[in-house]
Image (cartoon, helix red, strand yellow):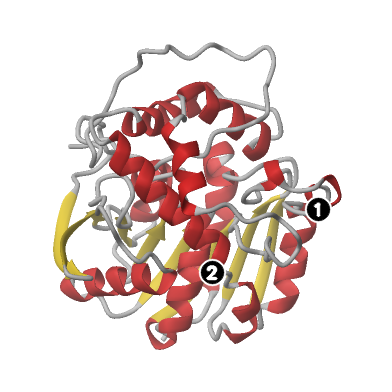
């Protein structure tokens, strides 16, 4: 069993009256060795870009009456397969086989010293994993950056994606086109090398959760900080920098109109996440990351879309109010046509 998590972007915002995080917290290996996952982690070994890589994943069978369907969960930048714990349990009880991979560069997966990151490449890696597992038809559930990846996967493999669900996906706008300054990979790397647990907590509290916090979120801060500050410190920071560059420079926004499957948008309206918002000019900062607007706008762009908003919730409604979230998700999954 492992615990895992992906790297994190420090906040420039100082939050007051916050619980202090210990300077010397637990540390985890470069593939999150030492962090306990909710289900057994397996590793898919494959070759990509001339490198031997391992992709960690959980493959959880239906614990309720099996319906013969599979759901693939795609985590966000500052999340891991482990952070889907409640969703995995709920979907499994509802009869679904659930596959929750950690993408290359994240969590329990390899952190290569060089890699040409693209959403296409990560989608291909995931497709190869599913082929190895004998899975041909899937429903995709992507959160945050995983929403950008799930969109790209659905565009690459439209005949194999029955349904697409996006949870507060980032990339509902093109930040660079809106005037957000570019950060080089070297600038991202220098930033990632300095990240602390307190930085992670402050950023997530202010951006993801509109100033709110629940004690159960502390575990995920510990996961990220422990990975970032463990023996793989520089590997983790370097891969994080490359991934941030991918996110910023490879928008999927312009291709929403090409999605061919039923698509569900699950949006916590208090979310204000936007990449590099901290260095954007004030006028730009004021108009980006406004999910109470972005969800509605995205729903107009996606042909077969359904929008479910969660007023008062933030970037991760599946973690803030899991019962409310999963009722909406499973109700939609069970009523949409499948091939």
Disc 2 and disc 1 in contact, CB within 8 angstroms: no
Label 1 crowd (10 A; few <14 / some 14-19 / many >=20): some
Nearest to N terminus: mark 2 or mark 1: 2
Position in image of residue 103 (x %, y %): 33, 57
Position of 176 with respect to 46 (left or right) is right
Residue pointed to by mark 1 = 284
- Please indicate, yes or no, whether residue 334 appears anywhere in the rendered image: no
Identify the mark at residue 70; answer none if there is no mark: none
Position in image of residue 180 (x %, y %): 71, 55
Query: Is 181 located above or below residue 160 in the figure?
Result: above
Judging depth in this view, the residue of 312 and 322 nearest the camera is 312
Residue at 24% x, 39% y is 30
The residues bearing labels 2 and 1 have C-alpha atoms spaced at a distance of: 19 Å
Position of 315 with respect to 190 (left or right) is right
Residue at 41% x, 47% y is 240
Judging depth in this view, the residue of 287 and 269 nearest the camera is 287
Position in image of residue 154 (x %, y %): 46, 78
Position in image of residue 247 (x %, y %): 52, 60
Say which element carries label 2: loop
Residue pointed to by mark 2 = 250
Position of the C terminus by quadrant: bottom left
- Please indicate, yes or no, whether residue 281 appears anywhere in the rendered image: yes
Residue at 72% x, 67% y is 177
């Amino acid at each position: 069993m492992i615990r895992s998590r992906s790297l994190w972007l420090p906040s420039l915002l100082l939050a007051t009256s916050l619980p202090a995080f210990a300077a010397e917290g637990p540390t985890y290996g470069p593939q999150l060795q030492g962090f306990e996952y909710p289900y057994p982690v397996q590793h898919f070994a494959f070759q990509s870009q001339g490198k031997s890589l391992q992709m960690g994943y959980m493959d959880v069978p239906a614990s309720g009456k099996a319906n013969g369907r599979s759901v693939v969960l795609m985590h966000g930048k500052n999340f891991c397969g482990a952070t889907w714990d409640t969703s995995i349990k709920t979907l499994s009880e509802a009869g679904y086989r659930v596959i929750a991979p950690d993408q290359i560069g994240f969590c329990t997966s390899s952190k290569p010293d060089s890699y040409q990151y693209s959403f296409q490449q990560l989608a291909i890696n995931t497709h190869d994993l599913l082929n190895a597992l004998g899975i041909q038809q899937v429903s995709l559930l992507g959160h945050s950056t995983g929403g950008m990846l799930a969109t790209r996967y659905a565009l690459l493999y439209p005949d194999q994606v029955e349904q697409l669900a996006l949870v507060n996906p980032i990339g509902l706008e093109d930040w660079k086109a809106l005037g957000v300054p570019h950060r080089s990979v070297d600038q991202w790397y220098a930033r990632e090398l300095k990240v602390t647990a307190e930085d992670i907590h402050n950023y997530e509290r202010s951006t993801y959760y509109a100033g709110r916090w629940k004690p159960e979120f502390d575990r995920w801060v510990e996961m990220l900080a422990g990975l970032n500050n463990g023996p793989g410190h520089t590997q983790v920071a370097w891969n994080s920098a490359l991934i941030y560059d991918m996110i910023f420079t490879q928008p999927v926004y312009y291709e929403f109109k090409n999605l061919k499957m039923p698509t569900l948008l699950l949006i916590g309206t208090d979310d204000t996440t936007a990449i590099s918002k901290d260095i954007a000019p004030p006028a730009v900062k004021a108009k980006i990351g406004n999910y109470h607007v972005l969800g509605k706008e995205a729903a107009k762009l996606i042909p077969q879309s359904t929008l479910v908003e969660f007023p008062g919730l933030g970037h991760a409604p599946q973690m803030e109010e899991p019962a409310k979230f999963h009722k909406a998700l499973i109700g939609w999954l069970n009523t949409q046509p499948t091939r």
